[in-house]
Image (cartoon, rainbow, N blue to C red):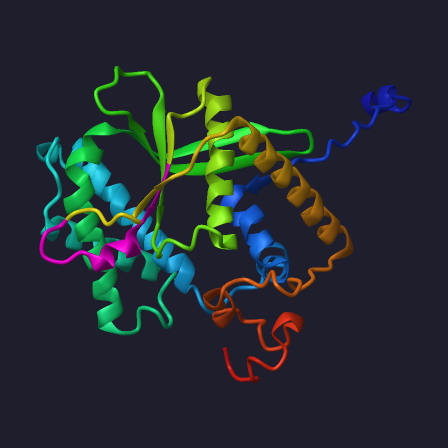
Amino acid sequence: MAWQKFQNLKVPTSESVPLKRRYSVTGDILSFQRCSRQYGHFAVRGYEPAHTVQIYYGMLIHQVLDRAHAHYEGLIDRTTKDKIPTDQDIERYFNEVDTTLRARGIRSVRAFTHAAEREAALRRLKLFNQIEGPELYPRVRDTEHRLQSDRDNYLLHGTVDVLADAPNWLPGMKAEIWDYKGGHPPPRNSEDFRRYEFQMLVYAELYRERNGDYPEKAVLYFLAALDTVENSPSRPQDALIEVPLDLQRIQVALHIFKNTVENIENCRLKDEWPAPRPGFEPDENTCDICDIRWNCPAKKGKYPMRYP
């Protein structure tokens, strides 16, 4: 029989190569730093949160502005090339994105229950389009610019909202990296502000590894700061914050990233996700929508048991 010729054949087994995990700046590192207990339950154990307000709002802002950029580039309709979207265009994109998110099960629970809150978000987007569009849109080189770096034991990745050329510079030269934030700018000495700076410093290094040089600027834009704008649309002083790209601070940020990955891996190994230490609790909004806040050691007695 032909099969008998292969009776003594031995095929060596291949060694299994462990897959590297991908760690994102915002979805993993900052989430773990903000609350390791919450991160462990939802990002690692896979529990589904009942409240998606923060996810909904962030995606709404980013996707509407992404469509505004595509509008100016003529990617949605060729006839809009080099044209700033009108207020009607922004409202249409807003409604389209809102409908799409709801169809995917990403919807508001509390913050957007009232029409006034929804209108506030739409107003911010219209004001951003009016104030920043004429200067920013012509300089946009890329949106949703994906960055990744292969480290020793993991992959580091992130997404920059916008790459913008410096005004009047030749193509191919250093760009500015922009990140949109839907909320208000935090105090300069706060933990939230430190995390935002950390994010941009890591992005600057990822940008260098992909493009060969550090960006010219790193810009944070807080859309809720536009709430103070009244009759004459102009940028409020605290809406745009530039993060200094100091090489030493960038290296410190990378070291913090590496240490945080090690902490996450240790928690994974033990499947233990401790609550934040006193003085390092996340902001109240993060805790208020957390489905596991009822028995959180860091918030004893603050949240009585009830349905999420």
Residue 277: image x %, image y %? 67, 63
**In this figure, what is the number of numbered marks?**
0
Is 80 situated above or below 280?
Answer: above
Q: Is residue 53 visible?
A: yes
Magenta span covers which residues?
219-233
- Whether the magenta-drawn stretch holds residue 70 is answered as no
| Residue located farthest toward the right when viewing the structure as drawn | 8
Q: Residue at x 24, y 43 (%)?
A: 67
**In the displayed structure image, the side of residue 257 where residue 90 appears, left or right:** left
Task: State left or right for residue 60 relative to residue 148.
Answer: left
Percent of width and height locating residue 86: 10, 47
Residue 24: image location, x then y, percent: 53, 42
Residue 170 found in image quarter: top left
Q: Which sits in the foreground, 300 or 148? A: 300
Query: Where is residue 271, by image quadrant?
Result: bottom right
Residue depicted at x 31% and y 54%:
60
- Please give the name of the residue rendered at 54% of the width and 32% of the height, measured from the top-left corner: 250
Image quarter hosting the N terminus = top right
Q: Nearer the viewer, residue 295 or 222?
A: 222
Instruction: Note whether 17 is above or below 122 in the view shown.
Output: above
Instruction: Tell me if residue 21 can be seen.
Output: no
Residue at (13, 50) in percent of width and height: 233
Is 228 magenta? The answer is yes
Q: Answer left or right for 247 relative to 92.
A: right
Classify 36 as above or below 30: below
Q: How far across and down, in percent of the image, does residue 108 sit?
A: 35, 67
